[in-house]
Amino acid sequence: MGFLSNLFSGQQKSDSPPAGQPDLDFYEKLVDNVAASDEFQIELKAALKMAFQDPKSFYDDSGEISLSDRGFNYPNDASSTPKFVLIEKMLAVGQMAEVDWKEEEEEIRFSIIEIAKAKGYDMQISTDDTYAMVTDKIIKSINDNEIKPLGYCLEILDINSDSYVFTIVPLDKQQLVRRMFDQLK
């Protein structure tokens, strides 16, 4: 029995994430906290389930999302599939934005306004350029000075890139979402 248990104990099911990686339950809880609309949450959870069960399906031209467009390839990047399925789906419906490291303030503001609309948040921020800074400081300044006073905040998801991926969440979810995003690094 010891020999067989040792032989099989190291094997993982094909739909299991690598050790230390968030699993489907984790992603479903994250969706509950960052995605608006029950209908979209159901759609996103289904896509994430597929990302765990059949990650290869997101790397060819026949899928709705092709992670190959981001320079990923299967099987080398299979463990990143759920994270980028989450991002791509949320970007597609406007509930997340991705801006370049050297983005103009006007574009950052436009992205924030679009996320608020997509999520149905009743908030307004200025469309005027106010901060003569680099992108990360502009995002932080808009967040601290304009969004937080309205009861919301921007949360950035690190994608190890020269761009910023972010969404808006209510302030009461800020700490939870930040901790969850940190686990996706």
Image (spheres, rainbow, N blue to C red):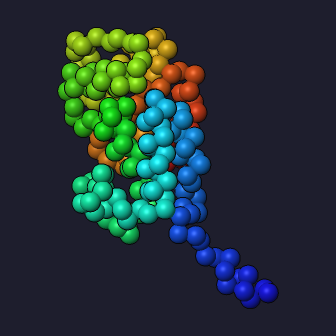
Q: Is residue 180 something one can see in this rendering?
A: no
Q: Is residue 167 above or below residue 158?
A: above
Question: Residue 19: where, in percent of width, then height?
Answer: 58, 63
Q: Residue furthest front?
A: 39
Which of the pair 72/92 is nearer the observer? 92
Q: Position of residue 47 (x, y in %)?
A: 43, 50
Q: Position of residue 51 (x, y in %)?
A: 44, 56
14 or 170, which is in the foreground? Answer: 14
Residue 127 pos. (x, y %):
24, 13
Image check: 33 left or right of 109? right
Residue at left offset 37%, top offset 65%? 56
- Residue 60 figure quarter: bottom left
In the image, residue 44 sits, relative to residue 118, either above or below, namely: below
110 sits left or right of 8 in the view = left
At horizontal 25% and vertical 22% (from top left) the residue drawn is 110
Give the number of callouts: 0
Farthest-out residue, right: 1
Left or right of residue 88: residue 61: left
From this viewpoint, is residue 129 visible? Answer: yes
Q: Is residue 134 above or below residue 84?
A: above
Where is 46 relative to 126, above or below?
Answer: below
The quadrant of the image that shows the N terminus is bottom right
